[in-house]
C-alpha cells in the first residue's frame, strides 16, 4: 500500500516548496511563517490536477508519515474577526475532495491517517485571545461540524500557536529517530 508522502514526492515533486512560501501574502508582501520545512503547495497541486475550473484549496499540505497525520493549512493574514467563514469552509470541503481524488488515483488509504485542518490567522498583540466557557473547543469560522465529518481534527488559532504546534510535531519526529 503506497504512502501519501511517497506519492507526493514522485508524482507531484514540482509542487513542493517551503511552509514559508505557502504562507506568503502577496497583497501585503509578508510571510506569516518563517519555517523552511518542505510542504506541498496545495494551491499549485490543485491547479495541476484541475487546470480548468479548479476548486478552491488550502495553502499547504504536510504529510507526517511517522505520526500518520496529514495537515491541511490555510493561512489568513488578518484578524480572526476578518476571516470569511464561507470561504474557509469551501476551501476545507474542496481540498478534502481533491485529497480523496489523489488518494483514490494512487490507492492510498486515507483512513490510515489522521486528517487535520488548520486555519492560521494573524496574531493580534492588542487583543487577548483566549477560550471562553462558550467556546470550549476553540474551533472558529463555523468549522465545528467539520470535525468528524471531513477531518479528524480542526485547529483554528493564531500564527504564534501554529508555530508552537508545528515545532512540537517536528520534535516528535526527531524523538523517534
Image (cartoon, rainbow, N blue to C red):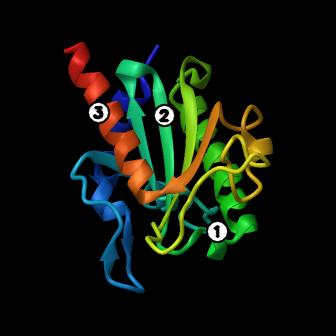
Q: Tag 2's secondary structure?
A: strand
Residue 170 shows which numbered tag?
A: 3
Q: Is residue 148 left or right of residue 35?
A: right
Residue at x 56% of width, y 59% of height = 129
Which quadrant would residue 111 be assigned to in this image?
A: top right
Of labels 2 and 1, earlier in sequence is 1
The foreground one among 165 and 1 is 165
The foreground one among 70 and 127 is 127
Q: Give the CA distance from mark 2 to mark 3.
A: 13 Å
Name the residue tied to disc 2.
Answer: 70
Name the residue tied to disc 1.
Answer: 53
User: Would you call the spot at circle 3 few (<14 residues within 10 Å), some (14-19), or many (20 or more)?
Assistant: few
Which quadrant would residue 152 be assigned to in this image?
A: top right
Of labels 2 and 3, earlier in sequence is 2
User: Would you call the spot at circle 2 few (<14 residues within 10 Å), some (14-19), or many (20 or more)?
Assistant: many
Q: Is residue 154 above or below residue 58?
A: above
Q: Is residue 55 above or below residue 169?
A: below
Amino acid at each position: 500500500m503506497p504512502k501519501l508522502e511517497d506519492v507526493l514526492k514522485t508524482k507531484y515533486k514540482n509542487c513542493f516548496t517551503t511552509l514559508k512560501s505557502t504562507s506568503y501574502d502577496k497583497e501585503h508582501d509578508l510571510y506569516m511563517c518563517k519555517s523552511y520545512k518542505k510542504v506541498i503547495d496545495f494551491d499549485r497541486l490543485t491547479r495541476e490536477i484541475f487546470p480548468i475550473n479548479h476548486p478552491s484549496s488550502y495553502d499547504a499540505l504536510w504529510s507526517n508519515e511517522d505520526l500518520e497525520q496529514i495537515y491541511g493549512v490555510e493561512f489568513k493574514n488578518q484578524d480572526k474577526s476578518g476571516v470569511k467563514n464561507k470561504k474557509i469552509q469551501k476551501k476545507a470541503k474542496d481540498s478534502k475532495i481533491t485529497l480523496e481524488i489523489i488518494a483514490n488515483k494512487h490507492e492510498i488509504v486515507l483512513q490510515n491517517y489522521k486528517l487535520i485542518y488548520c486555519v492560521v490567522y494573524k496574531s493580534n498583540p492588542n487583543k487577548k485571545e483566549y477560550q471562553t466557557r462558550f467556546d470550549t473547543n476553540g474551533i472558529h469560522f463555523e468549522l465545528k461540524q467539520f470535525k468528524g465529518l471531513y477531518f479528524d481534527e480542526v485547529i483554528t488559532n493564531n500564527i504564534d500557536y501554529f508555530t508552537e504546534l508545528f515545532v512540537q510535531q517536528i520534535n516528535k519526529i526527531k524523538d523517534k529517530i
